[in-house]
Amino acid sequence: MTGRLSVIGIGPGDPELLTLKAVRVIKESPVLCVPKGREEGSSLALSIVQKAVTLEGKEIIEAHFPMRKTRGSQEQPGGTQESAKDELDTKWNEIAGALLEKLKKGADVAFLTLGDPTIYSTFFYLYDKLLQLDPGLNIQIIPGVSSITASAATARISLGLGNESIAVLPANYLDNLRTTLKSFDTVVLMKVNKVLDEIISLLQEMGLISNAVCVSRAGMGDETIYRDITKIKQEALNYFSVVIVRK
């Protein structure tokens, strides 16, 4: 009998934001697959879960996914977009094969992902690979608290009221940011750490700089809120930084 694959959103960083269902399924799964951005690094997702669940006796599969743009991106530094995609395809195939091996032996596997699995999650690339290899797989997706809502909550901001519109986009794709800022009442910008200076410049030009707040590492121990984003040094931010622009 094939095991079940559970894709679990573990929230942005605070282990108390894991849902009851997430905790239960993690406890019940003998195999955990944990993503990490650097091959030699540790898994942030695993370090969060360890604070809420005892992992003794569980098999841990570490999945290294290189941090690369794929869809809609331009040529990458040090290589083409096509070479970056090929590298990711190789990694996804490797991890898909490792997971299928465990599932075919009847083991239930929990794949841990930060935030919510349905929002900018690497897992869905792997999901496509898995279904190509075995369309009949038993896969459940367990939602989690996203960094979007966690950032708004910690900054005490309503993302939308009544008929107001909300847009969410990765800030490293800046081509349509001006249009988006004009068209929506609230704009949430993900992954702002490398393009903060450009964002600040555009917001100043559009008269929206005072409407912006930045939350870095929401839900983590060193969570920081910046009410005046012009005073942030770009190098002080990391990947887990969100800017919310609320008109």
Image: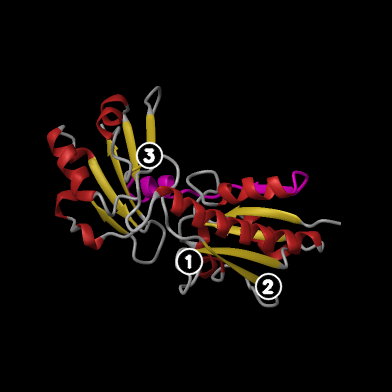
The residue labelled by disc 3 is 169
- Asked which secondary structure carries label 1, the reply is helix
- Mark toward the start of the polypeptide (1 vs 3): 1
- The correct choice, above or below, for 211 with respect to 13 in the image is above
> Residue 58, position in %: x, y?
69, 73
User: Which of the marked residues, 1 or 2, is nearer the chain's N terminus?
Assistant: 1
Report crowding for label 2: few under 14, some 14 to 19, many 20 or more residues within 10 A (C-alpha): few
Question: For the residue marked with disc 1, what is the amino acid?
Answer: Leu
Q: Which mark is residue 44?
A: 1
Between the C-alphas of marks 1 and 3, the distance is 23 Å
Whether residue 24 is visible to the viewer of this picture, yes or no, is no
Element under disc 2? strand
Distance from Cα at disc 1 to Cα at disc 2: 17 Å
Q: Check disc 3 and give the amino acid type.
A: Leu
Residue 59, disc: 2
Q: Earlier in the sequence, mark 3 or mark 2?
A: 2
